[in-house]
Amino acid sequence: MILIDAGQRDTRAFDAKILFAAQLSQAGYDVVIDEKTTPQIIDRNQKYEAAPFLTDIAQIVISAYVMIGAETICDETLMSLRAYQLAPDVPVSATGRFSDAQSLISSTAKISFALGREANVIDLNESQGRQLLTSSINPLVAATADIDETSASPAELFLFLPQDWLDEPGNLAHLSAMNHVPGFHLNILITGKGKDLIHKSDYSGVSVFGLNEMPPQTLAKRAGAAVFLGDGVPGERMAMFAMDVMCRSGVLVDCTTSGAFVNSGAPALRGPTDLAGLPNFLQYTVATNLVELGRQARQSNWLDRNSIQRLIEALGPGFVARATPPATTPKPQTIFLPTNGNGLGHAQRCSLIATAMPTAQKPAFAAFPSCIPLINSKGYSCMPLVQKSQGHDDPFANDLLNYLRLRQLFNPGDHLVFDGGYVFDSIYRTVMEKSLTATWIRRGLWQAGQVTDAALDRERAFQQVIVPQEAFDELNTAYTHGLSVHQVGPIVQDVAPTPGGVEKLKQKLARTFEHKFDQLVVSMLGGGIASDRAAQLHALCAMLQQRPNCLHLIVVWPGSRISAGLQGWKNTRVVKTKHALDLCQAADLVISAAGYNSYHEILYHQIPSILIPQSAPFLDDQERRARAASDRGLAAIVLADELLMLDREVAAYLDNGKSATIRAELEKTVLPERGNKRAAELICAKVNR
Amino acid sequence: MKTLPRIAYFLDPGFPGGTSGAVAAELAAIANIAQLEVHAVSSAMFGSKTVAPQIRKVLSKLGLDLIWDAPVVSGDVVLLHNPSFLKFHREVNQKIIADHLIVIAHENFLRPGGFESFDVGHCLDLIDRCSLTLQKSIAPISPYNRLGVEQWLSANSAAGHWAVVEQDWFNICEFEIFPPTKSPKDRRGRHSRAGPEKFPLLVDMDHCFSKSAQSNVILGADLFLNEKLDRNHWNMVPFGGLEVARYFEMIDFMIYFTAPTWRESFGRVLAEAIAAGKVVISDPDTASVFNDAIVPARPSEVDDIVANFVSNPKLYRDQVIKAQKNLTAFSASAFRQEFQSLINTNVRRAA
């Protein structure tokens, strides 16, 4: 393991370490950062970027050591170096931009005192010559890598904009116009605050990345061209991004007022310094010559002098030999990742689509613990993800762990299928960093406050969005548009009843529960995570206890918690099962929440039901969904506080023939074709691309 | 009446520890055989006008003023102490005019392995540019220091006009002499400033201050204390956290090793320990300064050497007495003699 360190211990030096570690890692080196060097305060993005490299040094063998930013070395760094007690054969190198010979001598001496021997100290001013950013801690080298073909056409254009340019009202309009320049797809690079401002403006349709949102090399992989506006080179991250763009045959357009990129000797193209002149320049000068400009830049001597290969050579033979050979590329796989949600809906939907895929393309899963039994029961392997917990220091600590697991799980070429509303950082980063092809299964019926640019912003990481439709048109709303957004029919389980199966099941239930019955009622109101339905369940138990010829089953998923008091009712039984639909099909009445899966299963399997929608800010709009069925006479809706209404409806279903009426209406109703197969085809098409 | 030679000192008076101590002792030693002027340069290292307490004290005692940043520094001989103070200067605004300019090389020019300790070429170049003299010499302060000076000069032909003074410009070591203990115990210690160059690798520290010792006192252990180093058998005290006299009461053996990539140029601290009646053990390079007054060793040999002295008190006593006798070679009178010889040989005086 190559240990990356920095002369200083501040946040800036830590950031430089992360970037350098990522760059070496990408070049095939096993690199680590001592977790004890993490500053007290680092931001969320830095935590994600650092996590793959942070290590307890006591647990590893250090095979080489590199210190960056060695022009100023603090005592803590020197003491750590001393404490590592590196063996004499462990190569030690340091890089710095030394202002003069004395600075180089001082740093060389300090390192040697801590190390007990001499280190290989590299003066980047000498080895690299003129540089983009003479004050950078990072060695600022460019790493060659393949262009990310998932975003090859049209070329992605990244435009860096200083935040204060948003103060000029006309600039946003110019940017919006630039979004339509032929040959490019525009992405703005701006501070996080600038991104928020753009999202809140009238021009929110433009793709915007925060400067720290993604590692520079991840953005550079996607960039066909990069434009820099403003006064000069805007910091180390952007300098590194620019280096990587050039090295990957992208075109760097220097529109800075100081000509900072061109004047450093970098193979950049000088462009106009104002937004007004930029669209024409991009269209007629850059877009038309994109390939040739990129090819010429790639051949630049300056770029060669600043390449990671040159640096590795300078680090010495001990480093050159340490790149791990590329592992044999495993066969690409499709991995479904259902979000945790409040029930098992996402996992259920994913498993239905997976089942519709050809056997030869059997996918795998990564899912939260509550979903794993369901997924395993369908015959799929599943890597467990970590559930959020109050015990974690950071609210996103579990997602950090999941990020590390997903990084391990996925290889370039794999296809990730995410089902959920909010794309977690772990997923977003894994897709972008690994250049995965990805599908987002995103059912609709979001509540008004949930439809935000921030929520939909991450759609750009996915090659396609599959929107499972609701059964009724008025419930379908398109949140985003385009060729990559596919509407498919409702994803619904299809369990055909076997002749005589219902009667046999009822007999079995009577035997199992030692209770003869004429009427079967099934309640499926969830495990109480999103909405507490204990009052409704108790009310149901009480009213059904008045009906000795009735068996009331409270059905929950195995492992769910259920109020202990529910066990005491005479003709109520709690059933924990994976086969709820079988019970529902045998039931005379189902009392259910109106989640996507249970709702559509009820409709498509013509089951008489009373719907008690759950309501929470993070849930879909279940009340609208329930009313759509109720308005059509296909179910009854009872709100959570309408217990008297519930009593009347139960009586209507069981005593007054409403069950039969509803069932007859459902039989007559033509519902959209199921979308399971179409969704599976869309996914397979991306996998086979 | 014979006119005393005019000797002008040119220095950064802010140097802590050994360098300023040596200069102060030297001023006191030659005050009555020379007309002294002391010129100070605003420091780029220690803040603009820092004066070490030893310098302040001796100037007060001798009734001399410290002259700051005079445009011209002149004398029959100008003594520039420790040229490394110029390493952060871009230029020197003073002019040095003298028959003989002697640069006293306190800090080693080279570290073990031949690596420069500071930008020697830059410092000598600044001195060259600001000085008009008939003769320019570099005076090493110890045999080890001399090796570095000569090696550096031979590798840098552009500095070929610099002569090297034949005699070492040694530090005056006039400490109160204490007799050795009659019953030495395995009580070990070391003291120094807290700089990382002053300490060997941890593995060597563990050899030098092993669990087998009755006690181990590390004075100047700030780095280890900051790091919360886990060594229960070490009494770690920050620099200045203990009177040196008290510290010497706590030990019988001074075990002094530095980073292998650094060496003391003289090692006043070792002379101080010898005077205090202790057996001193150090690496062979450092030991060479004081002839056979210091027991040369490798860290891994320390346990055996100490055990041998503890089991043989006479051997201990003989070693200390021999070492203390050697210290007379570094007395003020010895220095005066060397100094006068140098001045008389090299300074052309008006009749």
Image (cartoon, coloured by chain):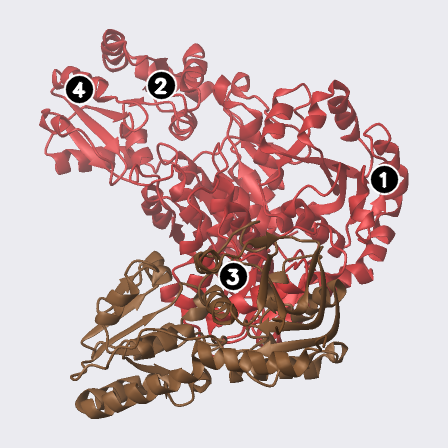
Chain colours: A red, B brown
Q: Counting residues from the N terminus, which is met first, the one under dot 3 or under dot 2?
A: 3
Q: Give how far across and how far down residue A12 sits, in percent.
A: 55, 47
Q: Nearer the viewer, residue B212 or B296?
A: B296
Quote the CA–CA distance across marks 3 and 1: 37 Å
Q: Give how far across and how far down residue B229 sits, in percent.
A: 31, 63
**Element marked by disc 4:** helix
Mark 2, residue position: A613
User: Quick check: A288 above or below B119?
Assistant: above
Which callout, 3 or 2, points to the residue nearer the camera?
3
Quadrant where the C terminus of chain B lies? bottom right
Q: So how many labels did they put on this image?
A: 4
Q: Specify the label residue A538 is tagged with.
A: 4
Mark 3, residue position: A4
Mark 1, residue position: A271
Q: Counting residues from the N terminus, which is met first, the one under dot 1 or under dot 4?
A: 1
Which callout, 3 or 1, points to the residue nearer the camera?
3
Q: Nearer the viewer, residue A537 or B103?
A: B103
